[in-house]
Image (spheres, grey):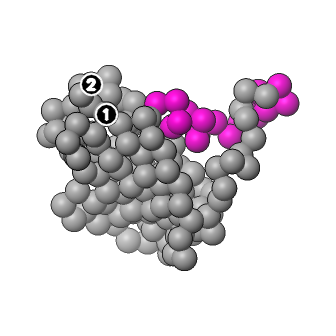
Amino acid sequence: MHEPIIKGNMISIPSSLEYLTNIDDFIEGILRGFEVEDSLIADIAISVSELVNNSVNHGNHSDSDKTVSVSISKKGTDIEIMIEDQGQGFNPQEISNPLDEENLLKDTGRGIFIVNALMDKVDVKTTSSGTKTTITKSIA
């Protein structure tokens, strides 16, 4: 298993949740450099953690030979973050609503719901090499 690789505003980790703190530290550090408010940093960090967790567990099935990459940029008053895995992809419309009665007590299934609630825009694309999820949050 290799170590996280950081290049500018991009970090790549092996598909293991043991590197989630590396992602959190990386994202929060860049957001502080962008002078983002603490409350927005928390929302963004939670969203990124949820998506990286999904990428590791559901996308790459914790295969340490696969990676998850996260890149972050500031575009005007928006923060844009792209999370990419090497999985088979998924259709977000096929995810069960975690608020439906039969799903309330399930241990999983809330990640995308939480991200949609916290971010201004969520775009999921399946590519030939995996899933690319782009989230956007206005900091204005």
- The residue segment tinted magenta is 101-118
Is 76 left, or right, of 84 in this rendering?
left
Crowd band around label 2 with a 10 angstrom C-alpha radius: few (<14), some (14–19), many (20+): few
* Marking on residue 38: 2
Residue at image location 51% in from the left, 37% down from the top: 115
Q: Is residue 113 above or below residue 90?
A: above
Residue 103: image location, x then y, percent: 79, 32
Asked whether 113 falls inside the magenta stretch, the response is yes
Identify the secondary structure beneath mark 2: helix
Residue closer to the observer: 64 or 101: 101
Give me the disc on residue 2.
Answer: none
Give the foreground label among 1 and 2.
1
Q: Amino acid at mark 2?
A: Asp
Q: How many marks?
A: 2
Identify which residue, 112 or 108, lies in the foreground: 112
Query: Of label 1 and label 2, which has the lower sequence position?
Result: 2
**Residue 13, position as x, y percentages in the image:** 39, 62
> Residue 44, located in which quarter of the rendered image?
top left
The question of residue 60 being in magenta is answered with: no
- Going by the image, does 11 lie left or right of 17? left
Label 1: state its secondary structure: strand
Quadrant that contains the N terminus: bottom left
Looking at the rendered structure, the kind of residue marked 1 is Ser
The residue furthest right is: 102
Residue position for label 1: 138
- Please state which of residues 95 and 23 is positioned toward the viewer in this rendering: 95
Q: Is residue 21 left or right of residue 112?
A: left
Q: Residue furthest front?
A: 76
Residue 38's quadrant in the figure? top left
**Residue at x 56% of width, y 65% of height:** 126
